Image (cartoon, rainbow, N blue to C red):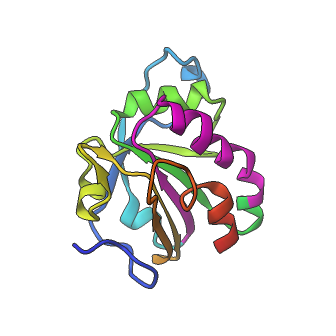
Amino acid sequence: MAPLKAGDAFPEGVTFTYVPYTEEKADVKACGVPISYDASKQFRDKKVVLFSVPGAFTPTCTVSHLPGYLEHLPDLKKKGVDIVAVLAYNDPWVMAAWGKASGVKGDDILFFSDSDTNFSKANAWVLGERSGRYALIFDHGRVIYSEVEPGKEVTVSGADAVLAKL
């Protein structure tokens, strides 16, 4: 598959894994049960922001990338975004713990695992064996924004850049 670009349809057969947030498992050390998330189906009729990071709990991802989305979550929702999700190669338990440690509750931001980096590899958006740093906006199954970071900084994949394209 060629890398997704503006105008493309979101591909069929894309699934991620995640641990849904529950109050009973709200403690960062509590483990929930990972489930499969059919992104192809769930993204079809929604406006979605999906951003990818090389790894949960890593310095740039935790200090620079995720906080922008936490801060601008109300702005994203005002622009009609139904789903905000972050993707990394980490397993679903690490992703869930990262969300909890970052103060995310409910489904404000979904923390997806692409543990085999299948989605990132299919789009040639990897850093070694990890997911690359990129952002995508989908509107009812169509890509309207697709940018991969050109360097180590958070620029085109950050919340400010995404908001500017909504």
Q: Nearer the viewer, residue 28 or 67?
A: 67
Q: Quick check: can you spot residue 21? A: no
Q: Nearer the viewer, residue 38 or 68?
A: 68
Q: Determine the residue positioned at 23% across, 44% down.
A: 116
Against 27, is 165 above or below? below
Q: Position of residue 149 (x, y in %)?
A: 46, 58
Farthest residue in the top direction? 29
Q: Compared to 98, does 13 lie above or below?
A: below
Identity of the residue drawn at 30% across and 56% down: 120
Left-right relation of 163 to 86: right
Please state if 63 lies on the left or on the right of 141 as rendered. right
Q: Is residue 80 visible?
A: yes
Which segment did they paint magenta? 46-75
Q: Position of residue 143 (x, y in %)?
A: 47, 76
Residue 30 falls within the magenta-colored stretch: no
- In the rendered image, which quarter contains the N terminus? bottom left
Residue 152 in picture, x, y percent from top left: 46, 47
Residue lying farthest to the front in this orientation: 151
Left or right side of 103 for 98? left
Q: Residue at x 66, y 40 (%)?
A: 67
Whether 92 is drawn above or below 23: the answer is below
